Each structure stands twice: as structure tokens, then as C-alpha cells.
Image (spheres, rainbow, N blue to C red):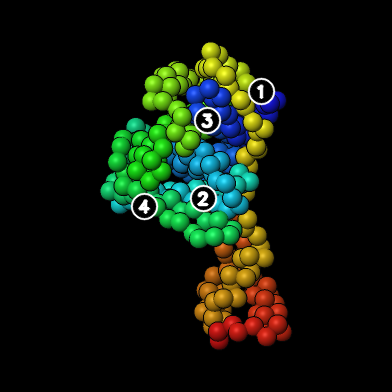
């Protein structure tokens, strides 16, 4: 087996050499904490974001190209939107929108109401793909297993876990999938499912990949590949906020300034606020004019 990285913010891929089944293991603390700290999320929404984060990371690991996957839950329940975006370099970010009271024991359907999951695969080269999946199943893992069964025709199981370990929020998960070469048997997969079902949160949050996989599959030949770090990455900046400001008509922008005294832009993904006063805005429009900008007046 390859040398593992620490259990924090890392994705491991592995292969059962004799059973034609592939697996993935992702373990996150800081990356998850950064996502749930951008807003005052109720505990069930934190859990939902964690499961969506783990799912997206596991799915991006299946990409065979440069690009990104966005997984977006939409519904008419207290949570109208929960979205995670990740790319082939495992840079991830996410946010949820909610309102009203949310019970401490709220599950997927309590949170989302009538809704669906939108999976968008956006390669840097090639065509964008979007799949829309109904929320069939009691959990996000069941919804995704149905998606794989229907769209990929590949037997797939997911284990998605969130919780606290040593006083810190953790999110972790595992994926098993039959290889498309057709040599695996249903009995092989069922055997590995039963073994993986025994995994405990404590093990997922604290054990390094080598030790965890040995505990679960010590009778099997497991090949563990080079691990990949996972990190929170937002991409917002003052420059991007400035670029957004000059797309707005000057008259409208100066109306905001006269009322508010400044223009404030808030990033939902990381919680950063960018503030621009009249001098800042004057300079932005002057610079745009100098560049021959087609700003609407």
C-alpha cells in the first residue's frame, strides 16, 4: 500500500485486486469546518452540507478529466438550496440557504420538502452534462445510489458520516463501485458492502487510510493509491467584487451610495465582506472608462 497522508482533508482511492471493485475514502475536518462556519447553520443543515460535501468529493474522484462537479439540492422546504462545488484538484466550496424553524432531528425530506438533486459535470474541454435526480430514498446516500444505478448502470454504495471528534466537526465517507470491466460478481460486492457497513464514525474520523482499510478488509488484497489533499477554496476577491460593481449602471450604484454610504458585497461561500465607498466606486468607473469599457450609463 502507498504511504497514507494524515486523516485530515484527504481523499484516498483504492482497488480490490481480485474482486473488480474500486473504493474511495475521504476524511475532512478543516475543509468542512470552513464551509459550515460561513453562516449560523442549524445542526441538521450542517449535517446535510457535510454529506453533500463528502458526496461531491467522492464523485469528483471519479472524473477522468480536468473539470468540476456541482451538486445542488433544491426544494420547497425550510432549506431551499444546498450546493457544493468541487473540481478534479479537490478544491471545494459550498453554501446553503434556509429559513424558518428546523427541528433538531430533521432529515433530508424535512429539510428539502419536495425537491431534487442537480448534478452538473463541467469539463474544461468538452460538453457540460447535467443530470436531475428526484429525492428517492430517505437519505442523500440512497438518492445517489439510485442515480448511479439508473444513469451509470454501476452498482454503487456510499457511506456518508458527519459528527464531532475531539471537539471538532468532521465529515467523512466511503464509496464502493463495481468496475465496468464486468468481471466482478454480485456476491463479491455484497461481501464488501457487509464489511464496510461495520465502519464506525470514530474510525472514519480518526484512523489513517492504511489502518482503516486493514480493519475493514484484512482478508482482501487492497491496492491503495497515492492520496490527494482536499481543501476549501472560495475564489472570491476584492477584484472580482469590483468587476461586479462596474456591471451595474452608474446611476443605480450612486443611488445605493447616497442611501447606504457604501456598497457592500458579501460572499456566501466564505463569509467575507467587501466594502466600497464613493471614492472607490469613482475610481472603478473612471478606470473602466479609460479602458474603453461599454459600461451602461
Q: Position of residue 151 (x, y in %)?
A: 38, 46
Dot 4 surroundings within 10 Å: few (below 14), some, or many (20 or more)? Answer: some
Task: Give the number of the mark in front: 3 or 4.
Answer: 3
Q: What residue appears at the point 58 percent right and 32 percent down from the top-left corner? A: 13
Q: With respect to residue 68, does 127 lie above or below?
A: below
Q: Position of residue 263 (x, y in %)?
A: 58, 69
Mark 2 to mark 3 CA distance (whole Å) = 19 Å
Dot 2 surroundings within 10 Å: few (below 14), some, or many (20 or more)? Answer: many
Residue at mark 3: 23
Residue at mark 1: 1
User: Element under label 3?
Assistant: strand
Which residue lies most toward the top here? 219
Residue 235 seen anywhere in this rendered image of the structure: yes
Q: With respect to residue 196, does 262 lie above or below?
A: below
Mark 3 to mark 1 CA distance (whole Å) = 14 Å
Residue 144 seen anywhere in this rendered image of the structure: no
Dot 1 surroundings within 10 Å: few (below 14), some, or many (20 or more)? Answer: few
Q: Counting residues from the N terminus, which is met first, the one under dot 2 or under dot 1?
A: 1
Q: Counting residues from the N terminus, which is met first, the one under dot 4 or under dot 1?
A: 1
Residue at mark 2: 69
Query: Residue 132, which numbered label?
Result: 4
- Assign the C terminus to one quadrant of the image: bottom right
Q: What residue appears at the point 62 percent right and 34 percent down from the top-left corner? A: 10
Location of residue 230 (image quadrant): top right
Task: Give the number of the mark in front: 2 or 1.
Answer: 1
Mark 2 to mark 1 CA distance (whole Å) = 29 Å
Q: What residue appears at the point 58 percent right and 29 percent down from the top-left corner? A: 14
Mark 2 to mark 4 CA distance (whole Å) = 13 Å
Q: Counting residues from the N terminus, which is met first, the one under dot 2 or under dot 3?
A: 3
Left or right relative to 41: residue 9: right
Q: Counting residues from the N terminus, which is met first, the one under dot 3 or under dot 4?
A: 3
Amino acid at each position: 500500500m502507498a504511504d497514507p497522508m494524515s486523516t485530515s482533508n484527504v481523499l484516498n482511492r483504492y482497488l480490490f485486486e481480485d474482486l473488480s471493485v474500486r473504493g474511495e475514502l475521504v476524511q475532512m475536518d478543516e475543509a468542512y469546518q470552513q464551509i459550515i462556519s460561513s453562516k449560523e447553520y442549524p445542526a441538521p443543515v450542517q449535517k446535510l452540507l457535510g454529506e453533500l460535501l463528502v458526496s461531491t468529493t467522492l464523485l469528483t474522484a471519479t472524473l477522468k478529466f480536468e473539470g468540476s462537479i456541482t451538486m445542488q439540492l433544491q426544494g420547497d422546504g425550510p432549506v431551499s438550496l444546498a450546493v457544493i462545488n468541487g473540481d478534479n484538484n479537490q478544491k471545494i466550496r459550498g453554501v446553503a440557504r434556509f429559513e424558518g424553524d428546523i427541528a433538531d432531528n430533521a432529515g433530508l425530506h424535512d429539510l428539502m420538502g419536495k425537491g431534487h438533486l442537480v448534478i452538473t459535470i463541467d469539463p474544461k474541454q468538452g460538453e457540460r452534462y447535467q443530470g436531475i435526480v428526484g429525492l428517492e430514498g430517505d437519505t442523500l446516500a440512497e438518492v445517489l445510489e439510485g442515480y448511479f444505478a439508473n444513469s451509470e448502470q454501476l452498482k454503487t454504495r456510499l457511506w456518508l458520516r458527519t459528527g464531532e471528534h475531539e471537539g471538532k466537526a468532521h465529515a467523512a465517507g466511503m464509496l464502493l463501485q463495481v468496475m465496468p470491466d464486468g468481471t466482478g460478481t454480485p456476491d463479491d460486492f455484497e461481501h464488501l458492502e457487509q464489511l464496510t457497513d461495520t465502519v464506525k464514525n470514530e474510525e472514519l474520523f480518526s484512523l489513517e487510510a492504511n489502518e482503516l482499510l486493514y480493519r475493514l478488509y484484512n482478508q482482501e488484497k487492497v491496492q491503495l493509491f497515492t492520496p490527494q489533499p482536499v481543501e476549501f477554496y472560495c475564489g472570491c476577491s476584492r477584484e472580482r467584487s469590483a468587476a461586479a460593481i462596474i456591471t451595474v449602471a452608474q446611476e443605480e450604484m450612486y443611488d445605493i451610495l447616497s442611501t447606504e454610504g457604501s456598497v457592500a458585497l458579501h460572499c456566501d461561500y466564505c463569509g467575507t465582506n467587501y466594502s466600497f465607498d464613493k471614492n472607490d466606486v469613482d475610481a472603478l468607473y473612471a478606470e473602466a472608462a479609460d479602458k474603453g469599457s461599454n459600461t451602461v450609463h
